[in-house]
Image (cartoon, rainbow, N blue to C red):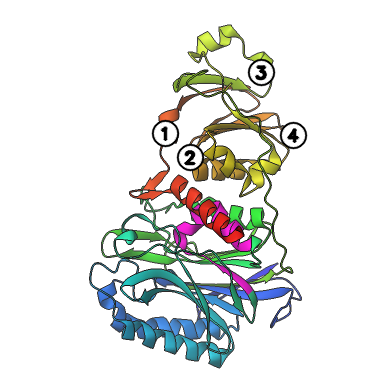
């Protein structure tokens, strides 16, 4: 691999040696993500010429597909005042002219207006400047439901580049959204996003999608994943973490932008022929229900070899319980975006997996599944004989090591009762909604 930074155009490019410049249905696709400085809606008209110029600079690098962030047109926080359709149409026309001029497709975040409803959409402009299609945000996040209507379909967009699996920001939190797009033929996942950060550390802007889920989405679906994010803040209430990302189908990061600043990243990704994923059912043995077996709040002591955890050890650690109510799963279930959803809907609140995955991927998948399904996870990594415990936020509670074979931690099943990731944004409700949509489509 080689990397080069072009300071004048602020473009970071990563490509394979000998990679061709593809067109049409090629095995390679040259993709770019333009990370923009966020702007308030009131500043859109005066900000738009600079955005258009940044798009033009990015297209000069000849990507086949260029991504812009969520709600680039006119902003993410749009407030209560209706958006002017003429303003949106004019910006889209200018992007269409640029797409036609440079023969590059553009996927931009925009407000889509339909009657009296507004959708937070990803709009795909094809290489000839025509509108290829759109994807409305399915899983609305916190206050954007105040002015947006949730999307009602999950389908890839047909284009001259093939089928593009477009999804918007928080849709990436729901594993079955991306997996459904791939199952229906998407060859790449492309996400305009506005990844917000908690701001707990101004020098290390955190976001679970940017830091974890982006690579998991690519790896579990075996397709490249691209996200274009914003940096800076908006309306004084949202702060963005940057980190626009291009990920290969194996989950390796090909290019990533900085946390702050405007920047274009560019990489060549391998595109395989459409290959619908299979829905793997959970290879799981249901655990006992907590009401009949284990207390909902307790401390547990565990080891990869349960025989080393004696009653005396439990008393010493003040951890009298185990996890007899855990569902036993395997790597096929852990790495499938579909498999554990059904188990979760049928009462799984703790899972235990004996894993042979590479250590870092074992940890990533455990964190992803626990955060998506709002449940506790315990993974025994058999090659290293280590044991990892993860909480419903996707945070590692504790892990064993060479000098600590036994781990102990607290479980509070009340934390698994709600799927709320942000006010009015319930991941468990969203998972159920995807399943209902899929059943209607399959009928």
Range of residues picked out in magenta: 163-182
Using the numbered discs, state the Cα–Cα distance from disc 1 to disc 2 in whole angstroms.
8 Å
Above/below status of 234 relative to 176: below
Residue 299 location (% of width, % of height): 48, 20
Using the numbered discs, state the Cα–Cα distance from disc 4 to disc 3 in whole angstroms.
17 Å
Above/below status of 363 relative to 435: above
Q: Name the one closer to the observer, 122 or 259.
A: 122
Nearest to N terminus: mark 4 or mark 1: 4
What residue sits right under mark 1 in the picture? 415
Q: Indicate the quadrant containing the C terminus: top left, top right, bottom left or bottom right.
A: bottom right
* Classed neighbour count for the residue bearing mark 4: other residues with Cα under 10 Å, few (<14), some (14–19), many (≥20): few
Label 1 near label 3: C-beta < 8 Å? no
Q: Secondary structure at mark 3?
A: helix
Q: Secondary structure at mark 2?
A: loop
- Residue 374's disc number: 2
Residue 38 appearing in the image: no
Label 2 near label 3: C-beta < 8 Å? no
Q: Name the one closer to the observer, 161 or 299.
A: 161
Q: Secondary structure at mark 4?
A: loop
- Residue 383's disc number: 4
Nearest to N terminus: mark 4 or mark 2: 2
What residue sits right under mark 3 in the picture? 306
Residue 317 location (% of width, % of height): 51, 14
Using the numbered discs, state the Cα–Cα distance from disc 4 to disc 2 in whole angstroms.
27 Å
> Which residue is farthest top?
312
Nearest to N terminus: mark 1 or mark 2: 2
Label 1 near label 4: C-beta < 8 Å? no
Which mark is in front, 3 or 1?
Answer: 1
Using the numbered discs, state the Cα–Cα distance from disc 3 to disc 2 in whole angstroms.
25 Å
Label 3 near label 4: C-beta < 8 Å? no
């Amino acid at each position: 691999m080689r990397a080069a930074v072009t300071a004048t155009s602020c473009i970071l490019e990563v490509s394979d040696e000998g990679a061709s410049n593809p067109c049409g249905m090629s095995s390679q696709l040259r993709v770019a993500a333009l990370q923009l400085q966020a702007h308030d809606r009131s500043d859109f008209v005066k900000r738009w010429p600079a955005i258009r110029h940044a798009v033009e600079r990015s297209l000069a690098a000849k990507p086949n597909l260029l991504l812009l962030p969520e709600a680039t047109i006119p902003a993410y926080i749009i407030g209560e005042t209706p958006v002017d359709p003429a303003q949106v149409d004019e910006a889209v026309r200018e992007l269409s002219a640029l797409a036609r001029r440079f023969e590059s497709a553009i996927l931009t975040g925009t407000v889509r207006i339909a009657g009296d409803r507004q959708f937070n959409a990803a709009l795909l402009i094809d290489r000839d400047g025509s509108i290829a299609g759109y994807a409305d945000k399915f899983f609305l996040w916190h206050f954007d439901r105040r002015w947006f209507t949730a999307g009602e379909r999950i389908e890839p967009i047909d284009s001259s580049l093939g089928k593009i699996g477009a999804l918007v920001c928080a849709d990436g939190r729901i594993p079955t959204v991306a997996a459904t797009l791939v199952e229906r033929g998407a060859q790449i996942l492309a996400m305009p996003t506005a990844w917000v950060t908690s701001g707990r550390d101004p020098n290390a802007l955190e976001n679970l999608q940017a830091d974890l889920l982006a690579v998991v989405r690519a790896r579990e679906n075996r397709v490249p994943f691209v996200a274009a994010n914003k940096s800076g803040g908006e309306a004084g209430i949202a702060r963005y973490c940057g980190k626009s990302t291009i990920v290969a189908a194996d989950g390796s990061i090909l290019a990533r932008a900085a946390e702050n600043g405007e920047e274009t990243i560019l990489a060549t990704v391998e595109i395989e022929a459409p290959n619908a994923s299979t829905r793997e059912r959970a290879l799981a043995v249901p655990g006992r229900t907590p009401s009949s077996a284990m207390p909902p709040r307790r401390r547990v002591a565990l080891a990869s070899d349960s025989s080393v955890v004696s009653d005396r050890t439990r008393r010493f650690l003040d951890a009298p319980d185990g996890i007899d109510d855990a569902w036993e799963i395997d790597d096929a279930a852990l790495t499938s975006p579909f498999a554990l959803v059904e188990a979760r809907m049928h009462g799984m609140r703790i899972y235990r997996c004996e894993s042979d995955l590479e250590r870092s991927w074992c940890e990533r998948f455990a964190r992803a599944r626990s955060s998506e399904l709002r449940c506790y996870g315990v993974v025994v990594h058999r090659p290293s004989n280590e044991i990892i415990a993860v909480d419903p936020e996707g945070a590692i509670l504790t892990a064993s090591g060479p000098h600590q074979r036994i781990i102990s931690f607290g479980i509070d099943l009340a934390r698994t009762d709600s799927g709320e990731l942000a006010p009015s944004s319930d991941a468990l409700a969203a998972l159920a909604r995807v399943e209902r949509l899929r059943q209607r489509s399959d009928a």
